[in-house]
Amino acid sequence: MKKLILSFILLFAASSFLQKAAAQEHPWMNYITPSGYFQTGFSTDDSFNNTFYIRRARFSISGTLYKGNAGKFEYKVQAEFANSPKLVDYYFKYSICDEFGIQLGQFKSPLSVENSEYAPLKLEMIDYSLLVQRFVRMSSSDLSGISSTGREMGLQFYGNLFKMNDGHHLFRYNVALFNGNGINKTDDDQRKDFVARLMFFPIKDLSLSGYYLRSLGPDPGIPPQYNDYDYYVFDRYGGGITYDGKYAWFRSEYMAGHTFGWRAHGVYATAGGKINGKIGIGLRYDYFAENSRLPGGFFDHAQQHITAGFSWYVIPRIRLQLNYTLRKEPDLYPTHFVNFMTSISL
């Protein structure tokens, strides 16, 4: 509870200071836009495990330092105050034109669309899909053993190609190099992660995507002094389809890859409707097989989650979410999980 109160006080104080400075029309405020959000809730399951929790308490400043004939220069710094305070985003972006830009710093990896394009306040469900949690370093259950909120430190080239009459572009690309060992860390093995993604937009609200990651990591079975001579390849490859319209959404992604010699794969599909921009109702199916080479049927030895979700914007800055999930873990009986979360934007 002390962390909850302290996080809220810090976010509120910082936001109030910057808003007051903006009201006084300080020139430097033309380059600073404050924002933040706070997420807290309650969860329970049929084993009577229940808890109140703080999911996120984030504050950020961002802005455009230059916009003119030579392009656009932007920045963002975002800090997390829940649980253990840390910086989660800090980067510069220089867009020379629509077709080419450079991003340097720490930011979301373009591996998967859900990870990079769906921030927590945009995500339809409370939790990210199993595919993102276990393959994109989003959570502590990631197969690599690294939990970095889906972010990495590195350099990215990006752009949008072939602008259509309605204003949208046919293609979007991302090519990035990352340290590959988590957030707020320098590279400890001098080997970089390579990530590439291409998205195709046949119409404005519909995209088809494909992506690939190649990484090198030390073999955990070899003593550290010999790790320079024997490295395992980490790879991730997949793609998906996304439709995000005014009244409905549909998204599905598949990804597979090798980690320490084991091959895993996963898929999710989510769909739902929107009512007056305030209420959302949706379903999601998750499947993830940690070792896809185990004998047996397709659904043996795999995680399977079915989630039904409801969200309601009480006012534009306050959203309530309620999720029910039927969970089937490998070789265990199904369990039931209920999660309620409130999001407050500053």
Image: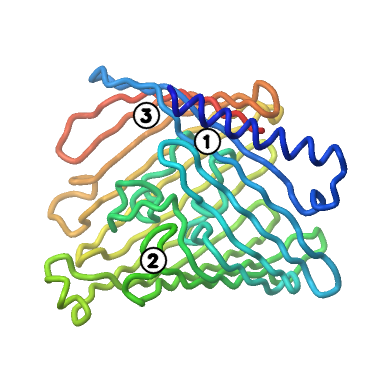
Question: Distance between the Cα atoms at labels 3 and 2?
Answer: 32 Å
Of the residues under marks 3 and 2, which one precedes in the sequence? Answer: 2
Counting from the top left corner in percent of width and height, residue 194 is at 43, 73
- Left or right, residue 248 beside residue 40: right
Q: Position of residue 29 (x, y in %)?
A: 80, 48
Label 1: state its secondary structure.
strand
Mark 3 or 1: in front is 1
Colour convention of the picture: rainbow
The answer to whether marks 3 and 1 mark residues whose Cβ atoms lie closer than 8 Å is no
**Residue wearing tag 1:** 57
> Which mark is first along the chain, 1 or 2?
1
Q: Which residue is mark 2?
A: 180
For the point 60% across and 28% down, which residue is it? 344
Label 2: which secondary element: loop
Q: Name the residue located 37 percent from the left edge and 34 percent from the top edge.
A: 306
Tag nearer the camera, 2 or 1 = 1
Q: Nearer the viewer, mark 3 or mark 2?
A: 2
Q: CA distance from mark 2 to mark 1?
A: 25 Å
Q: Mark 3 to mark 1: distance in Å?
A: 24 Å
Q: Is residue 312 above or below residue 31?
A: above
| Left or right, residue 225 beside residue 186 | left
The percent coordinates of residue 81 (x first, y second) are 49, 39
Residue occupying image coordinates x 15% and y 38%: 331
Which amino acid is tagged 2? Gly
Classify the position of the N terminus by image quarter.
top left
Look at the image and tell me in which quarter the C terminus lies. top right
* Label of residue 325 in the image: 3
Q: Helix, strand or loop at disc 3? A: strand
Crowd band around label 2 with a 10 angstrom C-alpha radius: few (<14), some (14–19), many (20+): many
Residue at the limit of the structure toward the bottom, as seen here: 229
- Height in image: 119 above or below 190? above
